[in-house]
Amino acid sequence: MKIGLKIFTYAAIAVAAVVGAHFVVMGLGKPSIEVNSMECEYVLDGEEAIFKGKGLLNCQKVVFPGNKEGRIVSEKTNDSLMTVEVPHGTAPGKILFFEDSDKPVVSNFLFRDNRGMIIDFDTYLATWGGYDPLDDEGGPIKVVMDKRDSVLVLPTTPPEQISGAYILFYQRYNEPWTMEFPTFLQYVAKPDEGGRGRKSIAGDNATSPIGELCLKFEVNIPKECAWKKQPRIEIFFGPYDCSNKHGREISPIAFWEPYLNAGEEGYYTDGWKTVSIPLTAFTHDYRNADAKFDKRLNLKEATNFSFVCMGDPGEGSTSEIFMALDNFRVVPDK
């Protein structure tokens, strides 16, 4: 009997070596599906959502919140990327991924995540900044007025909405940045500024460790408007009582500079994309790019929010910024 057991063990090891990660013995192995993220967490009903992970070819069924099953688009799916048509009538919440059993893999993110919302341009409004992408008749704008009241023709048509209103940044930079509305989004908490009062920007997550939280938002940068260099984006949460309303000089700052690793083509999203920035990345000081802030982000005191272009494109150089933005929120990173 011992010899037979040993032969079976060797055979099982040999089979496992052949089939690799998808080998499961009598149901004791872990599910081979692993879903890490969505390309964009906000997708309209009837449109295609893209999921990233491992073993996605093994997924047989995807169920959205409201017990709505999505259609897997097999011709746009491989082991690390899966495309699913969003069913009509779905709601915000977790998504379930089924392999071949009744026990699903549950997403560690929320579809249409509406927790910890700072600005969504519908219910949670900004104090000021950016351009409304629609004109008075509801069509996409074609021109904007810059800080010198000059008319600028947009290089492309603003994208379609994904969850109601959004904001558009557009500016051509040939000098160091100054605080002007075309590329400066701000929320000020004081009621006389239209804010919601002395409440943490993190909402119910204000007492959570910052290592467990992130800032998320959706962005759309067309390829023809790829972001290639400075100005970068600086993001910071200011305190309720500060003389200049934003508190940049007394707050830790996060730099968003995706163009640094984007190559010669620059950074673009090819549609709407969800960006996630850990709150532990809020470490910079306002004085220069290398300076570090001397304190950690304190969410209990953080009530204001700024998202702003900052930096010098270089002498004799011009940098064009075009990006659509929506749904700024502080949420758990898992």
Image (cartoon, grey):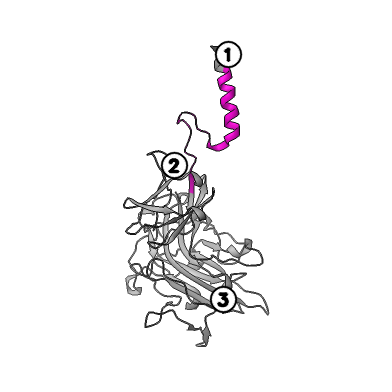
Outermost residue, front side: 75
What distance separates the C-alpha of mark 2 from that of mark 3? 51 Å
Helix, strand or loop at mark 1: helix
Q: Please say whether residue 190 is visible from this viewpoint.
A: yes
Q: Quadrant of residue 217?
A: bottom left
Q: Quadrant of residue 132?
A: bottom left
What distance separates the C-alpha of mark 1 from that of mark 3? 77 Å
Q: Position of residue 209 (x, y in %)?
A: 44, 49
Say whether residue 11 is magenta.
yes
Helix, strand or loop at mark 3: loop
Badge 2 or badge 3: first in the primary sequence: 2
Reading the image, the residue beneath label 2 is 99
Q: Is residue 20 above or below residue 97?
A: above
Crowding at dot 1, Cα within 10 Å, few <14 / some 14-19 / many 20+, comes out as few
Q: Position of residue 125 (x, y in %)?
A: 36, 70
Amino acid, disc 2: Glu
Q: Which residues are magenta?
A: 6-35
Badge 1 or badge 3: first in the primary sequence: 1
Instruction: Name the residue: 58% across, 13% down.
Output: 3
Crowding at dot 3, Cα within 10 Å, few <14 / some 14-19 / many 20+, comes out as some
What distance separates the C-alpha of mark 2 from that of mark 1? 36 Å
Badge 2 or badge 1: first in the primary sequence: 1
Reading the image, the residue beneath label 3 is 177
Reading the image, the residue beneath label 1 is 3
User: Which mark is in front, 2 or 3?
Assistant: 2
Q: Position of residue 330 (x, y in %)?
A: 42, 58
Instruction: Name the residue: 35% across, 54% down.
Output: 204
Q: Nearer the viewer, residue 329 or 90?
A: 90
Q: Which mark is residue 85?
A: none
